[in-house]
Image (tube, helix red, strand yellow):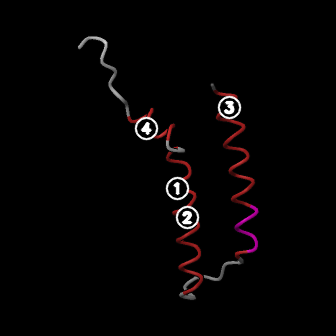
Amino acid sequence: MADEHRVTSTEITSKSGGIFWGIVFLVIGLIWLLAALEIITADLNLVLPLVVILAGVYLLVSKLMR
């Protein structure tokens, strides 16, 4: 039993893509919903390039930090 490895929350999130992607999709969904309900005016053509840029920055920083 001493060789048994406990899985930490950090290992779970890093294997599944991390909390980062959950937050990204949550924010995109919220912006999209609020724009569809006309609560906010959002140019969705601006949101997608920002997501791609943020994803690239995240991937670069996460690789450099390892």
Question: Marks 2/3: CA distance?
Answer: 24 Å
Q: Which secondary structure lies at badge 3?
A: helix
The three-letter amino acid code for the residue at tag 1 is Ile
Q: Give the magenta part as a residue range.
A: 45-49
Discs 2, 1 touching: Cβ within 8 Å: yes
Q: Quadrant of residue 11?
A: top left
Question: Marks 4/2: CA distance?
Answer: 22 Å
Q: Which residue is mark 2?
A: 27
**Which mark is nearer the camera, 2 or 3?**
3
Question: Marks 1/4: CA distance?
Answer: 16 Å
Question: Marks 4/3: CA distance?
Answer: 17 Å
**Residue for point 43% across, 37% down:** 12
Discs 4, 2 touching: Cβ within 8 Å: no
The three-letter amino acid code for the residue at tag 3 is Lys
Q: Which residue is mark 3?
A: 63
Q: Is residue 57 magenta?
A: no
Mark 4 packing: few (<14 Cα in 10 Å), some, or many (20+)?
Answer: few
Q: Name the disc covering residue 12, or none.
A: 4
Magenta span: predominant SS is: helix
Mark sitting earlier along the chain (1/4): 4
Q: Name the disc covering residue 23, or none.
A: 1
From what the image shows, is residue 8 above or below residue 26? Answer: above
From what the image shows, is residue 6 above or below residue 55? Answer: above
Q: Name the disc covering residue 53, or none.
A: none
Mark sitting earlier along the chain (4/3): 4
**Residue for point 75% across, 70% down:** 46
